[in-house]
Amino acid sequence: MASRCWRWWHWSAWPRIRPPPARSTPSSRQQFSTQEQTPQICVVGSGPAGFYTAQHLLKHHTQARVDIYEKQLVPFGLVRFGVAPDHPEVKNVIHTFTQTARSDRCAFHGNVVVGRDVTVPELREAYHAVVLSYGAEDHRAMEIPGEELPGVFSARAFVGWYNGLPENQELAPDLSCDTAVILGQGNVALDVARILLTPPEHLEKTDITEASLGLLRQSRVKTVWIVGRRGPLQVAFTIKELREMIQLPGTQPILDPADFLGLQDRIKEMPRPRKRLAELLLQTATEKPGGEDAARQAVAARAWGLRFFRSPQQVLPSADGRRAAGIRLAVTRLEGVGETARAVPTGDTEDLPCGLVLSSIGYKSRPIDPSVPFDPKLGVIPNMEGRVVDVPGLYCSGWVKRGPTGVIGTTMTDSFFTSQTLLQDLKAGLLPSGPRPGYAAIKALLSSRGIQPISFSDWEKLDAEEVSRGQGTGKPREKLLDPLEMLRLLGR
């Protein structure tokens, strides 16, 4: 997440899209005799990378047809399943994606798992070009003893749980403990801390799932520690998220002024965004709050704190060995300065009691198909400017191209670059010539394998149902969580 995986809803029911024109009839082949006139392009993944890639292709080639394949039944990826429910403004990008999906030259095919239901070579055979934009759907493991204990979760799974990702609905975290520890100091870590500590009544009008809100109402978590290997000048979160934490109702921040000794001169020399962030951290750690902040913090029943120069070494079990009861942290020091400084262990350790451990140390992509090269160390598809190495006609965009970093705007720019590269290759005659069947061929394959794709108009029916269910409680929507229920609602 990771960093700023996802900051990305208000939605309403949208009218049905028109079905895309048939793509493999004799008349259409006569009308478009070469791929330069009618390139058939396939995008795998319907998150920001996928939709921005499709948007750019449709805008800059007036005949291009783009099919978007998605393994979930519903579109929008981490905009739906990653952005915090109390950040609805970030989700407004869905309106733009909806306009793209409604284009009569674009089609959405949900409930299709590329690599299982259809292979990448089969897609490459059917299309002039294939763009892999499927994101980073896994988390980086801590690789420490005790990581498998109950009470230890990835932040990614926890975010998926409260945001309604079907695969995370069985998570059921035990929030009966007093203290939670989040490992990692990026925006996802702050999102999770904020959701844990926000008064539940402040979340009631968001699109958080009712099941997770029910557990949060019963939560006994009073203190959340957000732990990082390095120091205050190397945190990965942004000033907006930090400010939200400082102003969070019913909470007070805990920062150790000793962590900031000798940093004032260095802060003055930093680039402006990093400087403003460091100054706010320093001010929070060393100055007494005034006015409303002082009054609010004086009666705060909950607290959150930043622990610096600590690296997870072991999750400590309870006396009966049945669950997490704490975490052992290695004390670190920095070698080097600035954002490139490395944390090295000093040999000292510290035990921190807690009943909930959330690992937020990064996302990673998975390989999608044996035919596609993949770098397991970097967690990306090897590429040159979006062209997959040694596989002509195959491209990638977003996190699977560059790694899980950046905000939505970063992904937009990255996806535009990949689509521009593809169009340049098309113009230069580097892609297959002659007509390609596109979805007509894939539809026949999927049908023979018993796969029933979900169209964008199907999604709009599900969307209308979610909005309708939310209206009774004043929520923008109540998300559907069960794929089988979604299929039943669509008459499947």
Image (cartoon, grey):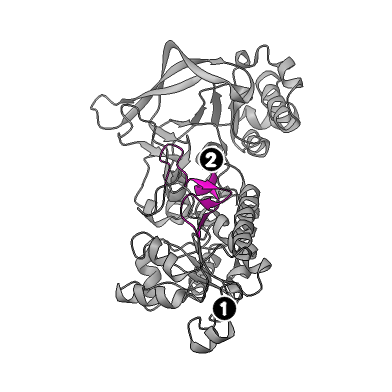
Tag nearer the camera, 1 or 2: 1
Place residue 242 in its image quadrant: top right
Would you say the magenta stretch is mainly helix, strand or loop?
Answer: loop
The magenta region covers: 374-403
Instruction: Tally the marks.
Output: 2
Label 2, on which residue? 188
Vertical arrangement, residue 396 with respect to residue 344, above or below? below
Q: CA distance from mark 1 to mark 2?
A: 34 Å
Q: Residue at x 29, y 26 (%)?
A: 318
> Residue 55: x percent and y percent?
63, 64
| Between 439 and 390, the one nearer to me in the picture | 390
Mark 2, other Cα within 10 Å: few <14 / some 14–19 / many ≥20? many
> Residue 277: x percent and y percent?
69, 30
> Residue 455: x percent and y percent?
47, 74
Disc number for residue 311 = none
Place residue 141 in its image quadrant: top left
For residue 393: magenta?
yes
Disc number for residue 17 = 1
Q: Residue at x 65, y 21 (%)?
A: 285
Q: Identify which amino acid the numbered label 2 is placed on.
A: Val
Q: Identify which amino acid the numbered label 1 is placed on.
A: Ile
Vertical arrangement, residue 109 with respect to residue 255, above or below? below
Residue 113 in sight:
no
| Between 374 and 242, the one nearer to me in the picture | 374
Q: Mark 1 or mark 2, which has the lower sequence index?
A: 1
Q: Residue at x 65, y 50 (%)?
A: 409
Quadrant in which the C terminus appears: bottom left
